[in-house]
Amino acid sequence: MAVNVTPSLVIPEPPDYSSCEDDHDVTYFTDLHQPDNNLPEPARTIDKLLNNLVDRAWEVISKQEKTEKNAQAPRQIPVLNATKEMKLPARTNCIVCSEDGLYLFVGHAHGLSVISTSTLTCVKTWQNERVELTSISCASLGNITHLLCSVDDMGIARLFVHHMENIYLIKIINETEDINQRNICAKFEVSRRGDFGAAVMMSSGSVWLDVYRFPQDVWFKELETKRATQSPWATEAKLSPIVLLMKIKPPEIPAGSSLKSPSEVLQKTEEGTIIGSGQNHLISSHQWENQNVAFRKMFVKYLISSSMRPSQQKAEGPSNCTCHFLLHEGFYSIPGEIKAAKDIPIAMCLWWNGSHNLLQYLLLKKEKDSEPRPDVLWPNSQEILCSAVSACTRFIVLGLDGQLVTIWDRRFGCPYANIVIPGDSAIYRMKLLLQSQLPVTPLLQGPFLPTLQLVLTCRSGECYSVTASRGEDTCTVPLIERPADPSCSVSVAVPVPFLKCLILLMQRNGQVSIWEMEDGAPMFILNLPHTHVLSSLREPVYVLEPIQQNLYITGNRKTPLAKVTDSGEDESSLFIFSFSECSMMDLYRVKRPAVAEKETRATLSGLEEACNFYFQERADSWKERNRNLPFQWEQLPKHAIK
């Protein structure tokens, strides 16, 4: 190719590399690339292209280096300090907040104290030097009246009422003259509006559940009378007695029926109280024997291997019971057509440790049974380990053995979702939050499928956040993997109801933080003063108050063990984190609270309306079901028994 060369361009001779220095070499190459107006046009164009290419390459390299440095550098997480502090009595074991957010009820080593959240002062105290409360359950009765169910360290259950900034002891549930014959109360809870209470009792190796009804209307009148006549310093009040509705014992293994023909079975099922209960079946003894033989034949290799293992001592019966009060939901009817208000529970569900079945008992029966029988049974494939109920009581979430989570929808009596949690650790605790922005009006005009947000904690220290919705894929995000150091395990994991998609995490090393549910990343660190530490690293004493958007955490001063032993007391404080005053929370603040109880409950007048509502929801979700059908067929052969 011909190139026009200017006659004045002189190409220098190559230098002698044996005698030149390094700086001469650099000068030579630099002079060669110096822009010169005498260069021909093609040479200048090539020179500009080379320079631009080199500059762009350096820009790309520098950007990549900055990105890598930013990725390697730890992200600065905002730190939030406590806004207020208040001194607490020694050994504060439990704390609960009233529904209106006006009062805190604190159980400690010397009784019960009532604290005003506006002034952070103790307004009333029920004091007893020999009583150390360990748990409190609170219900709002209205008119600045609260019902408190407490249990102390000796297993004694007490019932208090807080009325007009006065606190009265109503009754000791398991009080007996002979202490050797006293029943031990393991748990005492009250329904949200204070209509019912449930106490788990233990005695001589047996366990049962006592269900009470509280006469609220009568108590209001009696409290007003006593307030006008009694001294304001009175601490006890004899009110109308509570009513024991039922005493529920763990269900026994059902025995075979003596009925011999199908006609006899049909005659026994005319009342409709046998089929569907799960416990009052009509299965013959011969059918039980055939089922046992088929089971042993199918799982013979597992039975042989388990028999070769050393025998482990097992409890003869259930050791504890977990119960939840349920509001009116679904299309099942109440016997006797008893009308109940929307906020009064009509039933309660419970499960016993080691059981696969969730049992449901009606509370508003006219006839009392000597031995209550479950009205509904919710069967599960694995043993139940933990449970949670939504605020509207429509959804019941069960954590099962084998990292399985089942969500039951009480409205239609069918599973809402089934979730498998990764890992091999048993599910220990779970918290449930309902998130939806749907208005109230379309509840009965179309499907109401809210999004459920779950926070799961495993025994080995892992923590997961799960977002589940019918007809959509379930999202499981690991927040904390199994830690190598047990001190980093999660002790508390709860969703924050007034902050969207944020979770409160407390670890056993004392760290308190706010995490994002979707990304699984820490967003804020809640810092206690360097002089204090969480009061209990395994079971922190705290409460989230949604009305004023505050977090109350108890902490103990870092005092040498010798001083604590000598004095016998520890210095406790209550630290308040006010999220409403934090501008960094505005991005996550829920403008409209998470779905309220009244907005999620549909009042169905009859069976026909309930069926129409169910068919409408099925018609609206057919696309999602058809989309998931091929995947379900693929999974079926994998789980088939060979």
Image (tube, rainbow, N blue to C red):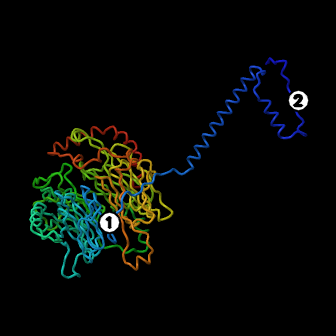
Residue 200: which quarter of the image? bottom left
Q: Is residue 159 left or right of residue 217?
A: right
Residue 261 x/y as whole percent:
17, 60
Residue 315 x/y as whole percent:
33, 73
Position of residue 435 relative to residue 112, above or below, is above
User: On residue 203, which mark appears?
Assistant: none
How many numbered discs sit on the rendered protein? 2
Residue 25 or residue 571, whichever sits in front: 571
User: Which residue is label 2 attached to?
Assistant: 13
Q: Is residue 229 left or right of residue 36?
A: left
User: Which residue is label 1 attached to?
Assistant: 354
Position of residue 245 relative to residue 419, above or below, is below
Residue 179 x/y as whole percent:
22, 81
**Dot 2: element:** loop
Residue 92 or residue 478, whichever sits in front: 92
Tell me which residue sits at (41%, 63%) in the image: 459
User: Dot 1, crowdedness within 10 Å: few (<14), some or many (≥20)?
Assistant: some
Of marks 2 and 1, which one's residue comes earlier in the chain?
2
Tell me which residue sits at (64%, 39%) in the image: 61
In the rendered image, is residue 7 in sight? yes
- Give the label, 2 or 1, closer to the camera: 2
Rendered-image quadrant of the C terminus: bottom left
Residue 156 or residue 16, whichever sits in front: 16
Q: Is residue 272 left or right of residue 30?
A: left
User: Dot 2, crowdedness within 10 Å: few (<14), some or many (≥20)?
Assistant: few
Q: CA distance from mark 2 to mark 1?
A: 95 Å
Q: Name the amino acid type tagged 1.
A: Gly
In the rendered image, is residue 255 in sight? no
Q: Name the amino acid type tagged 2.
A: Glu
Tell me which residue sits at (30%, 70%) in the image: 108
Residue 367 x/y as whole percent:
10, 62
